[in-house]
């Protein structure tokens, strides 16, 4: 799957990922009204609204981008109906040829991590049959529990040719509270980064490892350092746009080959129609606003990479 | 909810929680066969099997125990159908008067943590209505992202009178890889424990805070130290029984009032019928074996607390 991701990045010339994190507040009124007319103001109605919203954004952007990253929390908040919309979104994006990064941030002790890995990336055995539960291509994983919480994910990835992005340095303001603490002179995130590099060594595609890392766009200096710590790991970079990151801040997340990072924008793309820059499209044409925002983001990052 | 938990612990004299982590391999053949006869060897069939398994164990133990802890990964591995079985289990246990600790180990950046909090402990707004998605009483939370990943959970708990158990020192063998690293002479888990105490200070029930911690039974020395760091926090203690913890190792997780900890056993209770000690019940009567295992666990912990 890492090979497919790289192939798609090279084909689109767009090392970006669209974060499908549909808060109901982002969904235009006419989509919500139609869904509620059919299902009522219910969890089913909300799930239908976010699914229709996602579908339009995917339809308007899939030819420009290599990957999407649905954030499962935004679906999970609507209970079972929300989870159905998540699964529908994953399946639809894969049908469209997109690489799907499930932003699930799971992580537990061994046998429990194995169950998460099976549910999101692998297949579960039922009697003599096997089934894929959610079937994303990549998943994000929380490293707090250490190697035996991560390895069951790696095993499933190896078997299924899928991949991981492990949280190393997250984009939020208080990420430093624990992640920046110095351990023998090195911040914790660097220690985690070293582990990611180690886990990744034996799990490589053609040029990069399928064990990647998450490093926030909001911490470019740390990104620069971590790039060197994990030379063969792809870095998933959240925090572009709405959270403050810009193309020029992100060049050091990439290797000299122009690869090695994939930059995520969620709100900046999916709620583009609410920004002044894209207001001209109007709420009705929110998908076109998202397409324009994707084009601008690609140009920003491409420009920054060419200028370095 | 922390008051209800304490009240139920005092009434049952059982500071324990039954972990409802139903691997299909634990579910007796006759339960699986019946479910597959009705739904086929499908995800629906597997979900029915684990639900019937859970129901029998709850029916046979609910009068002895204050709480259950369903581990969501074991349901999530079966996709949407598994999530339905999770929700059914949560609802049934609450109907039976049990406190339900959703072992979900969620955690993300601010707005995303808020979505998880709403989905598991709170209510989500849809138009003019509100709905509870999963509606557990407590949830476990991963602290790696720091305060702004945890606070949205705390806010929902405050509003809904629910609670958290935050991962401090987990029970697995490699938990020390990051959690034991020394930061200014103190292990990371102690730093997290101090934060749990701080977060808990302003969020108290009558005697204890509703912001608790997870500390593994397999690390009794660390439990003793953390008990002092977080005097007002309830400690959820996994790792009893199958993972190696015994009652006498656990006395220091409790305060002098006999409260402050709740010990979880999963496999040791729900798959008791497969242990030599309870083999006499037979596979058919797996619920009775679980009840006997609960009684033995309560006696072990009570005895250890009385002997100290």
Image (cartoon, coloured by chain):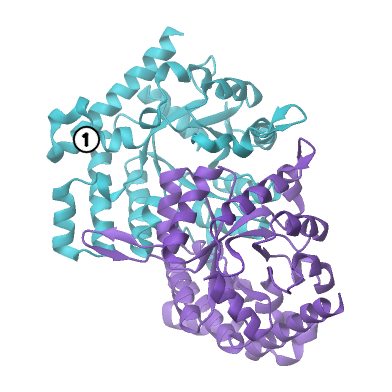
Chain colours: A cyan, B purple
Considering depth in this image, is B79 or B223 the residue closer to the camera? B223
The residue pinned by badge 1 equals: A274
Name above or below for residue A290 compared with residue B40: above
In the rendered image, which quarter is residue A229 located in? top right
- Write down the quadrant of residue A208 in the picture: top right
- Residue at image coords 56%, 45%: A141
Tell me if mark 1 has few (under 14), some (14-19) or many (20+) residues whose alpha carbon lies within 10 angstroms of its own.
many
Task: Give the residue at x 42% y 25%.
Answer: A245
Residue A184 in the image: above or below residue A89? above
Does residue B41 appear in the picture of this structure?
no
Given residues B39 and A106, the one toward you in this image is A106
Label 1 secondary element: helix
Who's the residue at 73% across and 65% down the image? Answer: B239
- Residue B181: x and y in percent read 76, 40
Residue pushed farthest right?
Answer: B307
Q: Is residue A31 left or right of residue A6?
A: left
Residue at x 48% of width, y 78% of height: B94
Task: Give the mark count.
Answer: 1
Q: Position of residue A305 (x, y in %)?
A: 43, 14
Q: Residue B280 location in percent, x, y?
A: 76, 91
Q: Is residue B182 visible?
A: yes
Chain letter, disc 1 residue = A
Residue A45 in percent (x, y) is at 23, 61
């Amino acid at each position: 799957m890492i090979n497919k991701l790289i192939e798609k990045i090279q084909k689109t010339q767009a090392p970006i990922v669209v974060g499908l994190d549909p808060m109901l507040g982002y969904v235009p009124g006419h989509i919500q009204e139609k869904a509620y007319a059919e299902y009522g103001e219910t969890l089913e109605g909300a799930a239908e609204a976010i699914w229709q919203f996602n579908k339009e954004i995917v339809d308007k952007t899939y030819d420009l981008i290599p990957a999407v990253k649905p954030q499962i929390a935004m679906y999970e908040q609507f209970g079972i109906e929300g989870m159905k919309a998540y699964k529908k979104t994953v399946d639809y994006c894969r049908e469209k040829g997109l690489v799907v990064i499930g932003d699930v941030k799971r992580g537990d002790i061994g046998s429990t991590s194995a169950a998460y890995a099976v549910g999101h990336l692998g297949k579960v055995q039922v009697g003599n049959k096997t089934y894929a539960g959610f079937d994303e291509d990549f998943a994000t994983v929380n490293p707090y529990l250490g190697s035996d919480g991560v390895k069951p994910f790696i095993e499933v990835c190896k078997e299924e040719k899928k991949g991981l992005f492990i949280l190393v340095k997250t984009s939020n303001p208080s990420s430093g509270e624990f992640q920046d603490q110095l351990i023998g002179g090195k911040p914790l995130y660097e220690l985690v980064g070293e582990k990611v590099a180690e886990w990744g060594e034996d799990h490589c595609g053609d040029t990069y490892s399928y064990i990647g890392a998450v490093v926030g766009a909001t911490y470019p200096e740390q990104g620069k350092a971590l790039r060197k710590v994990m030379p063969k790991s792809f870095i998933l970079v959240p925090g572009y746009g709405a959270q403050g990151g810009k193309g020029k801040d992100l060049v050091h997340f990439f290797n000299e080959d122009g690869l090695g990072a994939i930059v995520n924008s969620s709100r900046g793309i999916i709620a583009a129609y609410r920004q002044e820059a894209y207001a001209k499209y109007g709420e009705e044409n929110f998908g076109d606003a998202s397409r324009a925002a994707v084009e601008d983001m690609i140009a920003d990052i491409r420009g920054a990479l060419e200028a370095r």
